[in-house]
Amino acid sequence: MSFDRLAWHYRWMEAVLAGGLLQRCRTRWLAEVPTASNVLLVGEGHGRMLEACARTMPQARFTVLDQSAAMLDQARRRWRKIGTHQNITFQQTDLRTWRHTGAPFDLIVSNFFLDCFSPEELPRVIANIGAASAPTASWLVSDFIVPAAGWKRLRAQLVLALAYGFFRVATDISARRIVNPEGFLQQQDFQLQRRERFNHELLQADLWQRLAPKPKTQDAVSLGKPT
Ligand SMILES: C[S@@+](CC[C@H](N)C(=O)[O-])C[C@H]1O[C@@H](n2cnc3c(N)ncnc32)[C@H](O)[C@@H]1O
């Protein structure tokens, strides 16, 4: 799977097909994220979210992972253009097999990325990211969704059938449909904090937060009770 062929076209296609909508989703909860110093952006593509993060988090260091060298190149160009001086690492990586060995990340950003994976791949990708996340990390997630019922559901199914058809030809992604990531995020101890849906429930912007394990109370410790 590679987005290399799309990299040069991704930005203008987004502008033509979605206007400012995707960027509104990406940045919806950015102002509500607790202060982060070590930020991971996965499948970041052209770097528009990276730019927004850099502007709101002048003290943070950033790690940008993407499987596509051409997409990373787009993000690097954008980074140079905005001319900020934070510490940054760009790395070509497949998140399906990635293992992190450095300091844990306190903010994860994944926009229109989790929907690239099949039901078999998605739990592994989320577990790999979870293993790299700090005990109180936040996770910003934007993705397409399929509403539960009615005309909005039919509309979303049609839009997504066209989108997946296109991406399968252009990039050879393995996903054939949207897989709901919620259960896998919960398995990594993330809990949903904020959610907004856009464009008749075609898109969703979430803020998830990993909650540190509750400290055992003195009573529970002395009685040997689980907390
Ligand atoms: C649909 S684009 C989304 C780009 C951007 N995050 C956005 O908000 O528009 C998916 C991105 O995920 C990257 N990607 C897909 N599969 C990947 C994988 N297995 N490992 C790392 N990056 C991957 C692609 O190269 C591409 O940049």
Image (cartoon, rainbow, N blue to C red):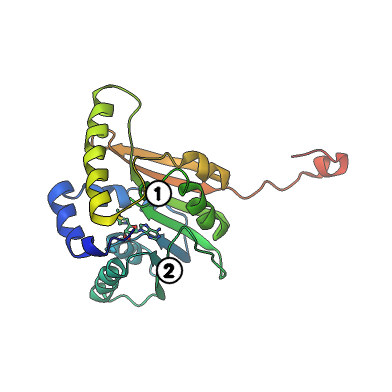
Label 1, secondary structure: give it: loop
Q: Is the residue at mark 1 in contact range of ligand 1, meaning its CB lies under 8 Å from it? A: yes
The residue identified by callout 1 is 117
Q: Is the residue at mark 2 in contact range of ligand 1, meaning its CB lies under 8 Å from it? A: no
Furthest residue toward left: 16
Which image quadrant shows ligand 1? bottom left
For residue 56, above or below residue 145: below
Locate residue 79 relative to residue 179 in the image: left or right: left
Locate residue 191 relative to residue 29 in the image: left or right: right
Q: Which residue occupies the foreground of this view, 102 or 54?
A: 102
Measured as percent of width and height from the top left, residue 115 is found at: 36, 46
Measured as percent of width and height from the top left, residue 1 is found at: 34, 58
The residue identified by callout 2 is 63
Locate residue 207 relative to residue 45 in the image: left or right: right
Q: Which amino acid does label 1 sit on?
A: Phe
Measured as percent of width and height from the top left, residue 118 is found at: 41, 46
- Please state which of the two labelled residues, at mark 1 or mark 2, is closer to the viewer: 1
Res 64 quadrant in image = bottom left
Q: Identify the residue at image location x=43%, y=46%.
A: 207
CA gap, disc 1 and disc 2: 21 Å
Label 2, secondary structure: give it: strand
